[in-house]
Image (tube, grey):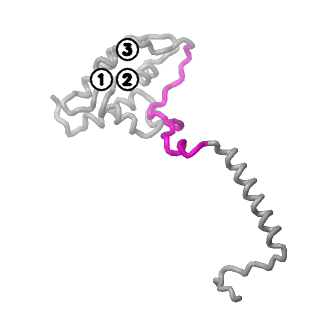
Amino acid sequence: MHRCSRRDQPLVPFDPEIEATARRQSRARKRQQITMEERDPRVLRDYVLLQVTGLTSPIVNPAIEANNFELRLALISFVEQNQFGGHSSKNPYLHLRNFLAKSDMIKLNGVSADAIRLRLFPFSLKDRGSDWLLNEKTNSITTWEALSKTFLSKYFPPARPLS
């Protein structure tokens, strides 16, 4: 019997105990398969489902020295009453002015105004406005000034007339 081989592949050496070698290789494959299953216990359904790990925000919240800081639900609801949806008929500059008026009502020792504004601003957006923020580069916004500039450059470009 002749074997056709490619020039770049060497011939397989003769193995007088081919059955023993096959059993040994089969056991090695089974051991490797078991260790792979131990490393990743997910079932097929888990590969299809969306994963929430790794979701990050474009906003980097500054550290807060106060131990008792939290955004109260009443304040969040107050901000959510006038959300910006990203429509061209809405004035983004006016939205920022109204947002600042609301967010500047909170003063806490050890908490900067930037920290409050950056944490509260996502609640002031909806629809296209919220989508815009979620699509910004991860960890790209570190200050209120950067957030407001990015927001205005998106929704209030220099070519837009003042109205």
For the residues bearing labels 3 and 2, Cβ distance under 8 angstroms:
no
Q: On screen, 151 above or below 70?
A: below
Element carrying mark 2: helix
Question: Which numbered disc flags the more N-terminal residue, 1 or 3?
Answer: 1
Residue at left offset 18%, top offset 30%: 89
| Residue type beneath disc 1 | Gln
Residue at left offset 49%, top offset 41%: 49
Name the residue beneath numbered marker 1: 83
**CA neighbours of label 3 inside 10 A, class few (<14), some (14 to 19), many (20+):** few
| Residue type beneath disc 2 | Phe
* Cα separation between marks 3 and 2: 15 Å
Q: Which residue range is magenta in the image?
A: 42-66
Question: Which numbered disc flags the more N-terminal residue, 3 or 2?
Answer: 3
Element carrying mark 3: loop
Q: On screen, 23 above or below 139?
A: below
Query: Where's residue 105, x and y in %?
Result: 37, 11
Left/right of residue 93 with respect to residue 1 in the rendered view = left
Residue at left offset 37%, top offset 23%: 123
Q: Quadrant of the C terminus?
A: top left
For the residues bearing labels 2 and 1, Cβ distance under 8 angstroms:
yes
Name the residue beneath numbered marker 2: 123
Query: Where's residue 48, x and y in %?
Result: 50, 44
Question: Which numbered disc flags the more N-terminal residue, 2 or 1?
Answer: 1
Q: Quadrant of residue 126?
A: top left
Name the residue beneath numbered marker 3: 104
* Cα separation between marks 1 and 3: 17 Å
Q: Nearer the viewer, residue 3 or 134?
A: 3
Foreground mark, 1 or 3, reads: 1
Q: On screen, 28 above or below 136?
A: below
Q: On screen, 21 above or below 33?
A: below
